[in-house]
Image (spheres, grey):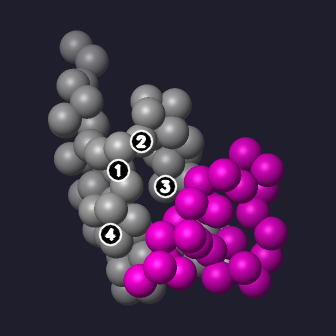
Amino acid sequence: MSETRDTRLRRLNMRSMRRGTKEMDILLMRYSAERLADLSDAELDAYEALLDENDQDIYQWISQQKPSPSEHEPMVADIIRIAANG
């Protein structure tokens, strides 16, 4: 049985909050709270793919210490935009 959108949003929200590093918890919890419900299914797929990456890599991409891989660029840019408006 495939999960409902609501179940998927709750699952991704939980994954955003329990990353393993406090920095990523804070950044992704904020992003999740502000944007997750408004994302399209394709954008949720992209976010879920980003969550599958290593926290240290994601942090370096968001903090712009290293460029993000092209497949994650739009999502990382959106997270940076939300973080900058905080």
- Which quadrant is home to the C terminus? bottom left
The answer to if 39 sits in the magenta stretch is no
Q: Nearer the observer, disc 1 or disc 3?
A: 1
Q: Amino acid at mark 4?
A: Met
- Which quadrant is home to the N terminus? top left
Q: What separation in Å lies between label 4 and label 2 (alpha carbons)?
A: 15 Å
Question: Residue at left 57%, top 60%?
Answer: 78
Question: Residue at left 43%, top 76%?
Answer: 27
Q: Amino acid at mark 1?
A: Leu
Q: Are marks 1 and 2 in contact (CB under 8 Å)?
A: yes
| Disc 1: CA contacts within 10 A as few (<14), some (14-19) or many (>=20) | some
Question: Residue at left 66%, top 52%?
Answer: 74
Q: Which residues are magenta?
A: 61-86
Tell which circle, 4 or 2, labels the residue nearer the N-terminal end.
4
**Residue 52, can we see it?**
no
| Disc 3: CA contacts within 10 A as few (<14), some (14-19) or many (>=20) | some
Q: Nearer the observer, disc 3 or disc 4?
A: 4
| Disc 4: CA contacts within 10 A as few (<14), some (14-19) or many (>=20) | many
Q: Count numbered badges in the picture.
A: 4
Q: What separation in Å lies between label 3 and label 4 (alpha carbons)?
A: 12 Å
Labelled disc at residue 51? 3
- According to the picture, the residue beneath numbered tag 4 turns out to be 29
Tell which circle, 3 or 2, labels the residue nearer the N-terminal end.
2
Question: Residue at left 50%, top 48%?
Answer: 47
Q: Amino acid at mark 3?
A: Leu
Q: What separation in Å lies between label 3 and label 2 (alpha carbons)?
A: 15 Å
Q: Amino acid at mark 2?
A: Leu
The answer to if 71 sits in the magenta stretch is yes
Tell which circle, 3 or 4, labels the residue nearer the N-terminal end.
4
- According to the picture, the residue beneath numbered tag 1 turns out to be 36
Q: What separation in Å lies between label 1 and label 4 (alpha carbons)?
A: 10 Å
